Image (spheres, rainbow, N blue to C red):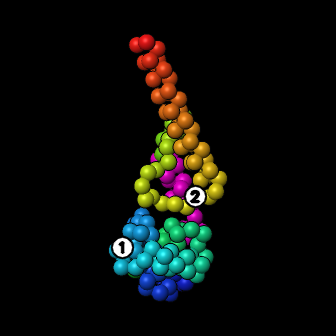
Amino acid sequence: MAESSLTLPEGQKACLRLVAKGMSSKEIAKALGLTPQTVDTYVKAAMARIGASNRREAARMLIAAEASLKLGSPPAGLADRDAGAEQLVATGTKGWLSWVRPPPVGGGFHDLNWSQKTYQALLVALISASIVIALALAIAGFLKTFS
C-alpha cells in the first residue's frame, strides 16, 4: 500500500496533501486552480489505487508513506485506521453533553456513514424543535401576561 501511494500522479498527491490539512474539495480546487469535480475525481482515483475507504485515510496513508521515505523506514500504523477517531473520542466531551452536542458547522471533514448522518440530522431536528417549542411557550406566556 505504501508503494502504491508513492506512485500516484502528482496531481493526486497534491490533492491528498491538502486533504490531510483539513481542506474541502472547494478549497483544494481554489488552491490548485482546478474545479471541485476534478479534485473529487483525483481523490477518488487515489483512494481506489491505494485501497483507502475514505479521503482522510488516503491522505494519512500518503503522508505516512512520504514520511517513511524521508526517514528510510516503513510507515508505522497503516493498519490502524481508527486511531484518529479514537483520539477525537478520547479528547471529546464527556457525559451527557456528548449526546446533545450539535454537529460541527463549516467545511469540516465529511466521512460519516449513513447512520451517523441520520443521527446528526435527527439531532439538528430535535434541537430545532426544542427551540421552536420554547419560543412558542415564551410568546404564549408573554401574551397571557399582558392581555
Q: Where is residue 32 in the image (x, y as percent from the top left)?
A: 36, 78
Q: Position of residue 4 (x, y in %)?
A: 55, 84
Does the magenta run of residues contain 84? yes
Point out the image quarter for the C terminus.
Answer: top left
Name the amino acid type tagged 2: Leu
Q: How far apart are marks 2 and 1 (CA)?
A: 24 Å
Residue where numbered disc 1 is placed: 30
Does the magenta run of residues contain 136? no
Mark 2 or 1: in front is 1
Q: Is 40 rendered above or below residue 21?
A: below
Q: In the rendered view, does 72 fall on the left or right side of 96?
A: left
Residue 67 shows up from this direction: no
Q: Is 46 rendered above or below residue 133?
A: below
Which segment is the magenta one? Answer: 73-91
Q: Position of residue 83 (x, y in %)?
A: 54, 59
Q: Which residue is drawn at 46% across and 14% down?
A: 144
Q: Is 82 rendered above or below residue 15?
A: above
Q: Is mark 1 on a helix, strand or loop?
A: helix
Name the amino acid type tagged 1: Lys
Residue 38 shows up from this direction: yes
Q: Nearer the viewer, residue 2 or 125?
A: 125
Residue where numbered disc 2 is placed: 112
